């Protein structure tokens, strides 16, 4: 206990807390000797059902396995002597059975379990066992209650006391709840309160009911008969409205008076964490309204108002909820107030809960037990269930107790024990166990070896590395065996050995090593992390309709990581779909042939991998087959539905109204959805907007509305074909005004200049204004200061705070205001004033571990205060100055890479470098807007690497027995070329021959291979070599054909320049010849092209007397196919065709415009070869003469 010299002792404790080791909770492997630990116990306040056996739980672990004993009402409970009580094996759990008789009430009392082994004793909390009770309602005769109209009334419930207390509610003889409203409601005690009675309240069946939770029974009190006396006869058919509930009868108006609670003030005591309910129910005519206030401040967001504002509720009370609450009841006659003084007490609750402590011999340690409460709890320490006495006859020199702390110094093996901390005050107690185990052990890993963790990109992941050792080992994480320990940035290392990666990226993939070390040794384990692409449905199924007997098809195309196997499953109406002979599923879709009514429903495609999944759904609607219903399907085909009709508004409330309509004709396709739209004439008059949608089987709905809006509504019906025209608008309905309900979203503060902060937010929607003259009240102040809030009210959606310091945090909040009052305040957000250019560069930039394609970068970080903004990254600028290969030109474009690191000795890896190159780098620090000054420049040269693939690799077969190979050196040798390596093997379909290899000097770029057989084909693999090794392989296979050149770079002949030129020349010559022919024809010339011709003339060939063809034949008046008529109907195009110059009409053109086949000329054996021969005038012959 605390010594007499209190201040000196407290200073010693403070020094010990700073210098001695305080160890967090540790899980000791169960194969090691250790004291007991309670794992499971029953509730401290334990109520049981008398119809069931009683089970009192007590589970514990330890080595050796603990033995168990019980105390009942503070005395040893001999379990073996009671035949109804048994204890489970290897457990302390008690089971009390009443199969052979006995009363559960006989076992009520206070129980406590003790678990012991050779190293100590742990104990449970004291468990108060009580049996649930649901007593019957006392029999009573209730006289009729007679009361005058307008008078207040209380119908008492007085439910029988139960354990736990029952829930009460009022019903009539038809088992219908009594309607409750602002005038009539049930109080917290179960009584039914009438602020004033009306004639219509006269009934004979007001019955209070009590529901007992444990027995699931409901007991009913004898019903009340209520008779209301009126000064005038009451006619229940007369009109009763909200402005005159008395139907014209004269009822005296009265000022409010409180029915509950009574008097002007009262008090309530509530425990911290419990639910607080305050009630104010008042009488009066007209019915009073209730308002709540709190003295010294506004009601906070925790406060909820129930029961028509008559009940104030706080679900979890804390100390700041104490104070004076006032309720005010008012009507037009007057008002009355009542004050309720709320006092918050607190049973003990933990501030610091002691946890198990494992120490090595000669180590020091602490057990700390701190609790709070009201009143402040008393702390008592026990060891193995017995109180620690300061004047013990056997003092422990290695242990001293000072209030809420036990200090251990130079502990030795054999002093293990279980310590209990008991914190208690007038309202309850806390009891917890913490063992002290003395062990001497080198580090050991508790988790599986070389675990593989797969995570989806951009997700958070945890790498576990549970460990143990004594003294407590230090654990550090490394990635790929490099760098300093991982902690900071997007890594976070926990004391239990877990490493958190806040957002996994592709570059986070690799092998992570956790190393645990203490003075007795070192142990490590590895976890391999693979970062995978997310699984996504990129083409989802779509809603569709299908005629009965046709096929329906739902798409479900998936994109996923190629290394993760996927499983695609289909559900119908959330149940597994049975795929049989009819329903077919392939990789990307589901096919449903011959659909029928049973196929209609919602189909869901679910694609899963071992680490994630995605789903998409669509609905299938089956339509009637046209052949089975010709009268409907052919005469009335499927179409959009008709507009809904006869819109009617009813049941008006402050923020809701009922809309009813009559659906139109669905045109043989059922309506699946009704869309309700609204138009308001205040802000966007004439613009129709969607309000809500409802299933197609509804035609009467309650519309949730916004205050201060003059609405009118219309309805649109939707079926599988489309949507109907809108219905005619309803009558208008105006809701009353109110303060804004919505809190403006998107609140943020960010500087646009270095000395300002722009606070901005999203404006409220027009329907969220709730009243006229909407404005916004903006509040801000420096964070972590006690300065007053600054405030401005504006109708804009932003406000700029000027003359701020550079990049300082501000607390910001916002609320909307209109003429009806203040809206709710937003949560406080943190904004920042503007950023400026960082003033300091990173220093001591250097590189290490230079490889062919990567290098480690190190630097000394800047002082965070010099960033003058939010730190974004350290940004490295690097570029290639040149290649160490002589004569090779390089691209000197600058590239960047960012490193996010906040550790004291940061490091990063610069990757994707070009081997055998000269690089230069520098670094800057960057915030969100600016970069700082550059660091020192560093030059380095990457090591030699393997070369790229040869620039080209051609296979040319110039004869049937030889293949000629050509290649060129790589564009990026990545070092000094020392030669080329050629591998090749014969291929015949899927069969391949043995691999053969040839090596060449760097200046050799050709090779000739003799073929053993004409039909042999080869697969070639060509790679360049440096001292590092072979580079990228250029693979090619010899072609099927011979006597033609083949290479990877082969292009189509139609794209070659010489071929295009030749074709252009031919086209030009043809054009010239056609022009000449046309000119001669226009002059009336005749061409004797068929002299001495034996072949008969075609019908279109009209021969003149001189043997020539007359081109002014009757056919001139017939337009050719595809020719266009002139304005006067004549044909202006010649009958000449290129077909006449070839062999028939088979002349065709290739896709590139070239002719297919050979050009030929018709020659007769007896045709003369004079100056007027047909060959001399044939355009085709002219082409051949050129060839």
Image: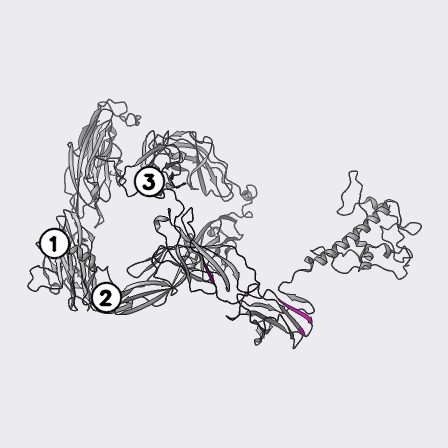
Tell me the number on the disc at residue 812. Answer: 3
Dot 3 alpha-carbon crowd within 10 angstroms: few under 14, some 14 to 19, many 20 or more? many
Tell me: residue 314, above or below residue 850.
above
Number of the label disc, if any, that sits on residue 8: 1
Please report the residue visible at 14 percent of the width from the left and 41 percent of the height from the top. 139
Comparing 582 with 460, the one in front is 460
Residue behind mark 2: 471
The first of marks 1 and 2 along the sequence is 1
What secondary structure is the stretch in magenta mostly built from? loop
- Image side of residue 1163 versus residue 299, left or right: right
Dot 1 falls on a residue whose secondary structure is helix
Query: Residue 1186, image x and y in percent?
Result: 81, 58
Query: Are dots 1 and 2 in contact, CB under 8 Å?
Result: no
Q: Is residue 165 visible?
A: yes
Q: Position of residue 919 (x, y in %)?
A: 48, 60
Q: Is residue 935 left or right of residue 362?
A: right
Q: Which residues are magenta?
A: 933-962
């Amino acid at each position: 206990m605390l010594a007499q010299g209190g201040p000196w002792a407290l200073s010693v404790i403070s020094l010990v807390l700073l210098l001695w080791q305080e160890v967090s909770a540790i899980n000791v492997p169960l194969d090691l000797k250790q004291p007991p630990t309670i794992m499971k116990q029953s509730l401290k306040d334990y109520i049981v059902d008398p119809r069931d056996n009683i089970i009192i739980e007590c589970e514990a672990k330890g080595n050796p396995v603990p033995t168990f004993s019980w105390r009942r009402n503070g005395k040893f409970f001999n379990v073996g002597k009671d035949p109804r009580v048994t204890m489970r094996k290897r457990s302390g759990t008690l089971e009390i059975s009443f199969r052979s008789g006995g009363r559960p009430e006989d076992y009520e009392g206070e129980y406590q379990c003790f678990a012991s082994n050779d190293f100590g004793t742990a104990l449970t909390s004291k468990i108060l066992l009580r049996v649930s009770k649901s007593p019957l309602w006392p029999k009573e005769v209730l006289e009729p209650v007679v009361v005058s109209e307008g008078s207040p009334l209380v119908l008492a419930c007085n439910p029988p006391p139960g354990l736990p207390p029952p829930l009460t509610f009022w019903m009539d003889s038809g088992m219908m709840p009594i309607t409750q409203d602002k005038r009539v409601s049930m109080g917290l005690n179960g009584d039914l309160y009438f602020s004033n009675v009306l004639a219509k309240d006269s009934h004979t069946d007001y019955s209070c009911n009590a529901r007992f939770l444990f027995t699931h029974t409901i007991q009913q009190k004898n019903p009340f008969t209520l008779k209301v006396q009126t000064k005038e006869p009451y006619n229940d058919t007369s009109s009763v409205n909200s402005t005159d509930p008395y139907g014209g009868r004269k009822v005296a108006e009265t000022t409010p008076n409180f029915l509950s609670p009574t008097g002007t003030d009262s008090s309530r005591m509530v425990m911290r964490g419990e639910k607080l309910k305050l009630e104010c129910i008042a009488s009066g005519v007209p019915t009073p309204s209730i308002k709540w206030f709190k003295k010294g401040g506004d009601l906070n967001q925790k406060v909820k108002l129930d029961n028509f504002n008559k009940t104030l509720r706080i679900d979890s009370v804390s100390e700041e909820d104490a104070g004076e609450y006032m309720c005010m009841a008012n009507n037009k006659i007057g008002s009355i107030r009542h004050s309720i003084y709320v006092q918050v007490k607190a049973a003990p609750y933990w501030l610091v809960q002691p946890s198990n402590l494992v120490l090595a011999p000669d180590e020091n340690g602490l057990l700390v037990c701190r609790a709070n409460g009201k009143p402040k709890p008393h702390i008592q320490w026990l060891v193995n269930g017995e109180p620690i006495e300061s004047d013990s006859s056997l003092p422990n020199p290695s242990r001293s107790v000072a209030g809420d702390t036990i200090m251990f110094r130079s502990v030795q093996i054999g002093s293990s024990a279980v310590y209990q901390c008991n914190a208690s005050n007038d309202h309850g107690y806390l009891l917890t166990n913490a063992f002290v185990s003395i062990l001497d052990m080198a580090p050991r890993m508790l988790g599986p070896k070389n675990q593989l963790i797969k995570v989806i990109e951009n997700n958070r992941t945890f790498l576990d590395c549970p460990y143990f050792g004594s003294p407590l080992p230090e654990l550090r994480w490394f990635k790929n065996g490099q760098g300093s320990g991982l902690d900071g940035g997007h890594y976070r290392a926990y004391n239990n050995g877990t490493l958190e990666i806040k957002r996994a990226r592709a570059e986070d993939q690799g092998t992570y090593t956790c190393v645990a070390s203490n003075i007795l040794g070192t142990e490590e384990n590895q976890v391999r992390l693979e970062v995978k692409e997310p699984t996504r449905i990129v083409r989802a199924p779509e809603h569709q309709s299908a005629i009965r007997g046709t096929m329906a098809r739902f798409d479900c195309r998936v994109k996923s990581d190629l290394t993760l196997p996927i499983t695609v499953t289909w559900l119908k109406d959330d149940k597994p779909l049975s795929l049989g002979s009819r329903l077919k599923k392939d990789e990307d879709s589901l096919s449903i042939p011959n659909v029928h009514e049973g196929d209609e429903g919602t189909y869901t495609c679910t694609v899963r991998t071992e680490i994630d999944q995605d789903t998409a759904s669509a609905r299938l609607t089956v339509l009637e087959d046209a052949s089975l219903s010709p009268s409907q399907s052919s005469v009335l085909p499927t179409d959009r539905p008709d507009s809904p009709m006869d819109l009617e508004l009813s049941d008006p409330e402050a923020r809701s109204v009922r809309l009813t309509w009559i659906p139109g004709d669905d045109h043989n396709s059922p309506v699946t959805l009704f869309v309700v739209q609204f138009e308001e004439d205040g802000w966007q008059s004439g613009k129709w907007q969607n309000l809500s949608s409802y299933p197609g089987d509804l035609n009467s709905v309650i519309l949730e509305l916004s205050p201060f809006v003059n609405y009118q509504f219309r309805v649109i019906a939707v079926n599988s074909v489309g949507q109907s025209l809108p219905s005619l608008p309803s009558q208008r309905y105006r809701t009353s005004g109110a303060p804004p309900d919505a809190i403006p979203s998107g609140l943020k503060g960010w500087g646009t200049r270095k000395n300002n902060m722009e606070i901005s937010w999203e404006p409220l929607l027009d329907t969220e204004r709730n009243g006229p003259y909407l404005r916004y009240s903006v509040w801000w102040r420096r964070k972590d200061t006690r300065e007053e809030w600054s405030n401005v009210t504006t109708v804009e959606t932003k406000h700029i705070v000027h003359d701020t310091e550079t990049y300082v945090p501000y607390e910001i909040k916002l609320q909307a205001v209109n003429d009806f009052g203040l809206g709710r305040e937003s949560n406080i957000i943190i904004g920042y004033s503007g950023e400026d250019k960082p003033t300091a560069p990173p220093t001591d930039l250097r590189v290490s571990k230079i490889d062919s394609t990567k290098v480690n970068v190190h630097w000394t970080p800047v002082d965070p205060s010099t960033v003058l903004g939010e730190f974004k990254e350290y940004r490295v600028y690097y570029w290639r100055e040149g290649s160490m290969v002589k004569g090779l030109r390089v691209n000197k474009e600058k590239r960047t890479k960012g490193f996010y690191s906040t550790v004291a000795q940061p490091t990063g890896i610069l990757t994707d470098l070009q081997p055998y190159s000269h690089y230069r780098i520098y670094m800057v620090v960057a915030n969100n807007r600016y970069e700082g000054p550059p660091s020192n420049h560093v030059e380095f040269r990457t090591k030699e690497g393997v070369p790229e693939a040869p620039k080209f690799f051609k296979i040319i077969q110039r004869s049937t027995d030889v293949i000629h190979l050509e290649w060129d050196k790589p564009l990026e040798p990545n070092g000094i070329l020392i030669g080329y390596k050629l591998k090749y093997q014969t291929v015949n379909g899927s069969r391949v021959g043995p691999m053969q290899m040839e090596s060449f000097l760097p200046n050799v770029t050709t090779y000739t291979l003799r073929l053993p057989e004409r039909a042999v084909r080869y697969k070639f693999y060509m790679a360049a070599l440096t001292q590092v090794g072979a580079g990228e392989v250029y693979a090619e296979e010899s072609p099927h054909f011979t006597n033609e050149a083949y290479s990877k770079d082969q292009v189509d002949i139609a794209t070659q320049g010489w071929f295009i030129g030749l074709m252009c020349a031919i086209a030009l010559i043809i054009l010239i010849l056609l022009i000449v022919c046309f000119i001669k024809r226009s002059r009336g010339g005749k061409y004797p092209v068929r002299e001495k011709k034996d072949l008969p003339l075609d019908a279109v060939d009209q021969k003149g007397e001189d043997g020539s063809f007359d081109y002014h034949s009757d056919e001139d008046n017939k337009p050719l196919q595809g020719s266009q008529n002139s304005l006067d109907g004549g044909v202006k195009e010649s009958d000449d065709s290129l077909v006449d110059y070839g062999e028939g009409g088979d002349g065709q053109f290739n896709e590139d415009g070239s002719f297919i086949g050979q050009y030929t000329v018709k020659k007769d054996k007896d045709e003369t070869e004079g100056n007027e021969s047909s060959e001399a005038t044939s355009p085709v012959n002219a082409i051949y003469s050129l060839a």
